[in-house]
Image (cartoon, grey):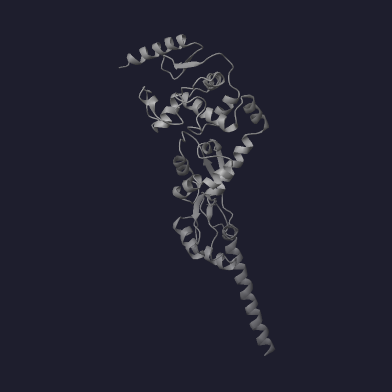
């Protein structure tokens, strides 16, 4: 009987060792294709659904191996949500560990181009996090949140900076806003704040002016010069008379020529009627344009007009008579196109 018991124990031990070896062999096998696969896991996803999702996305080579590893290493029944990158030759054990710990991969939120409204900003952000644009927009218009950050509904767009930010797909809209507020504070270091004070402007006023400058020209070298024109007007109490602010007030950036009838609009953004800066930015300017305002060109220009070459560049003038000559030359060039 002792021999039989020893024999049975040896068999059990052998099976156990063999099973353990087999499981570890499966666990340490590479089970992913030779390319990266991006997988979005939504809240509430079960381990079973995750296995099916991995299989349908061709993110694993052998679904059975992954299921064995999932049981052996106790894959959470409710997998942590996130954006995961399945890399080549990941082992089954590595996959289970990644999902159990929520080791998701960050990606880039790129703010670029003309962002003239919170709706456009919400749409851009919604493509990078799990929340939809409606929920994001609700956060971007949350008065309590805006007030707590030291802004109002007009100035709040100036908190955002065109740049590339590394974020997680599971970030909430509020977390994104707080992250971008942190970036705003980093940008407005002591040096930039001092330059703003030297202009007798607040940081948000500098951003507002930069938004106008950005809309006036696509030529980088002109930005400090145009900024100097507007700063000269501000110092002398002359209305800015900035056409981009009229387009913003009319909510029509496609307008090619500003007519007298456009100038009658009743809006805080009508810089033909109201002296000084509008209450907030008309678009989100890039950091380089903000710096162009802070490092504006010092000159005597009070006017600028598109050149008759029609290449997007401008002629600058210190007197109205000189400006009128430049304007007539431009109008003549335009009329020849008709």
Q: Residue furthest bottom?
A: 1
Q: Quadrant of residue 326?
A: top left
Q: Reply above or below: 53 against 264.
A: below
Q: From this viewpoint, is residue 106 visible?
A: no
| Quarter containing the C terminus | top left
- Image coords of residue 336 (percent x, y): 32, 13
Counting from the top left corner in percent of width and height, residue 47 is at 51, 64
Residue 116 point in image, percent of width and height: 46, 35
**Residue lying at 64% horizontally and 24% vertically, measured from the top left:** 198
Name the foreground residue: 167 vs 207: 207
Is 86 rendered above or below residue 116? below
Q: Quadrant of the N terminus?
A: bottom right
Residue at the far right: name it.
Answer: 2
The number of numbered badges drawn on the structure is 0
Q: Nearer the viewer, residue 30 or 206?
A: 206
Residue 216 in view in this figure: yes
Q: Is residue 258 above or below residue 203?
A: above
Query: In the visual, does 150 lie left or right of 338?
Result: right
Residue ranking furthest to the left: 338
The residue at the point 50 percent across, 35 percent down is 112
Q: Which percent across, then down, holds residue 310?
A: 41, 17
């Amino acid at each position: 009987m002792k021999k039989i018991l020893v024999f049975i124990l040896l068999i059990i031990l052998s099976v156990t060792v063999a099973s353990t070896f087999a499981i570890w062999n499966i666990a340490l096998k590479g089970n992913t294709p030779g390319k990266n696969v991006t997988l979005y896991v939504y809240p509430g996803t079960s381990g079973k659904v995750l296995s099916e999702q991995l299989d349908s996305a061709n993110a694993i080579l052998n679904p059975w191996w992954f299921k064995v590893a999932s049981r052996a290493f106790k894959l959470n029944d409710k997998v942590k949500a996130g954006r995961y990158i399945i890399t080549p030759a990941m082992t089954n054990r590595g996959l289970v560990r990644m999902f159990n710990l929520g080791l998701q991969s960050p990606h880039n939120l790129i703010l670029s181009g003309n962002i003239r409204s919170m709706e456009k900003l919400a749409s851009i952000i919604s493509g990078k996090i799990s929340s939809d644009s409606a929920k994001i927009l609700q956060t971007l218009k949350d008065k309590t949140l805006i007030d707590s950050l030291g802004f109002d509904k007009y100035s709040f767009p100036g908190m955002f900076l065109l740049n590339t930010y590394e974020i997680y797909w599971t970030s909430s809209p509020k977390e994104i806003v707080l992250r971008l507020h942190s970036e705003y504070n980093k940008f407005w270091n002591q040096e930039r704040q001092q330059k703003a004070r030297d202009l007798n402007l607040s940081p948000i006023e500098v951003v507002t002016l930069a938004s106008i400058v950005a809309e006036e020209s696509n030529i980088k070298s002109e930005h400090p010069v145009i900024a100097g024109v507007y700063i000269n007007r501000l110092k002398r109490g002359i209305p800015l008379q900035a056409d981009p602010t009229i387009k913003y007030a009319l909510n029509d950036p496609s307008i090619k020529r500003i007519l007298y009838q456009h100038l009658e609009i009743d809006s805080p953004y009508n810089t033909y009627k109201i002296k000084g800066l509008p209450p907030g930015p008309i678009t989100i300017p890039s950091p380089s344009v903000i710096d162009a305002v802070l490092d504006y060109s010092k000159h005597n220009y009070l006017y600028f007009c598109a050149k008759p070459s029609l290449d997007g560049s401008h002629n600058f003038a210190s007197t109205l008579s000189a400006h009128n000559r430049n304007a007539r030359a431009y109008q003549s060039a335009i009329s020849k196109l008709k």
